[in-house]
Amino acid sequence: MSAYTARAHTNIALLKYWGKADQNLIIPTTSSVSLTLNEFYTDTTVEFLDNLAADEIYLDGAFLTQTSTKKVQHLLDLVRQMAGLTNSARVTSYNHVPTSAGLASSASAFAALAGAASKAAGLSLSPIELSRLARQGSGSASRSIYGGFAIWERGYDDLSSYARSINEEVSWPIQLLTVIINDQPKKINSSNGMQNVVATDPFYQSWVAHANIQVNPMLEAIERHDLAAIGAIAEANALQMHAQNMMASPAFTYLTDESWQIISLVQNLRKEGLIAYVTMDAGPNVKIISKPSDTTIITEAIQASLPTATITAATPGPGLYITKGLK
Ligand code: PMV
């Protein structure tokens, strides 16, 4: 059988997925909307072999133990089931994104794995089938099948919960300026974080109700290419998500003093007339929704107050694609 390599880019949620209605199938409590980025991606090669006793998984050149790769093996099992295969697989993955630091490396990782594993198993899946498969590795990966803007429709079961494209080719000026404060892996992974919130936050149902109300205005803002409206809705949604973490028991937060420094800096830039809004995921890093032409002014402001931050300007990126198939 052939080895296949797939590349998938990270996506950042403009409306967040923060809670599962079904933990086994990864069915979310809300629909989420994202932008796939050009800058950060994962390359994954999968080959099903006759002579392997168990799946072998390598990340950035290092062999990973079976216990740390349960989700990868689960996705491989789903692919084996679909293709009627019993062979173990060798998976080699390279992350071109800081791992586990709230920059959605799991999104690009599981989307690339779904693409490479399904091809290597001889399957030819549609984007929706790939999205459902990637979803069962990591929810946010369902959206990285597509370039540009995507929406993961919440659905209610395996068949109905998948992402679809809103607009793959984004030809108007929007960027996410990523401000990396800390590239160390987070202490509470997103899965544990969100399920703590679902289980203990007394205001969680209000979050779900409000998040659902934010979907249509976000889709309309994307259709109008209205950067200020996209930013305003995304920032509110992100801050509301992080507020839920503070309402969990025990309360927790991914945001640090440096995160808040950037958040208030962006609020000040707005007072000066710039279109700039923040969004944060399961880590301290901040992404600034802004115009590419404002990169210098925003970067200079950040460097003046936080000289150690690494800043990368990311624009809309492509969906999943196969880069290599060996004979
Ligand atoms: O896909 P997961 O399990 O890594 O969860 C992602 C959660 C957030 O990044 C915080 C939000 C999102 O929708 O991507």
Image: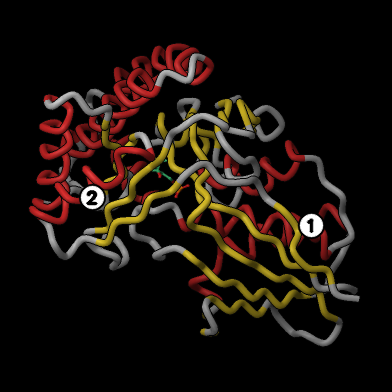
What residue is disc 2 on? Answer: 299
Residue 12 lies in quadrant: top left
Q: Are marks 2 and 1 in contact (CB under 8 Å)?
A: no
Seen from the viewer's position, the closer of residues 55 and 212 is: 212
Image point (26%, 36%), residue name: 278
Question: Vertical placement of 302 versus 29: above or below?
Answer: below
Callout 2: SS: helix
For the residue pair 217 and 306, the one nearer the viewer reads as: 306
Of all residues shown, which one is farthest toward the bottom?
51
Q: Residue type at mark 1: give it.
A: Ser
Which labelled disc corresponds to residue 118? 1
Please tell me how crowded label 1 is: few (under 14), some (14-19), or many (20+) other residues with Cα within 10 Å. many
Is 182 on the left or on the right of 118, as rendered? Answer: left
Residue 139 shows in the view = no
213 vs 71, left or right, is: left
**Quadrant including the N terminus:** bottom right
Name the image quarter holding residue 72: bottom right
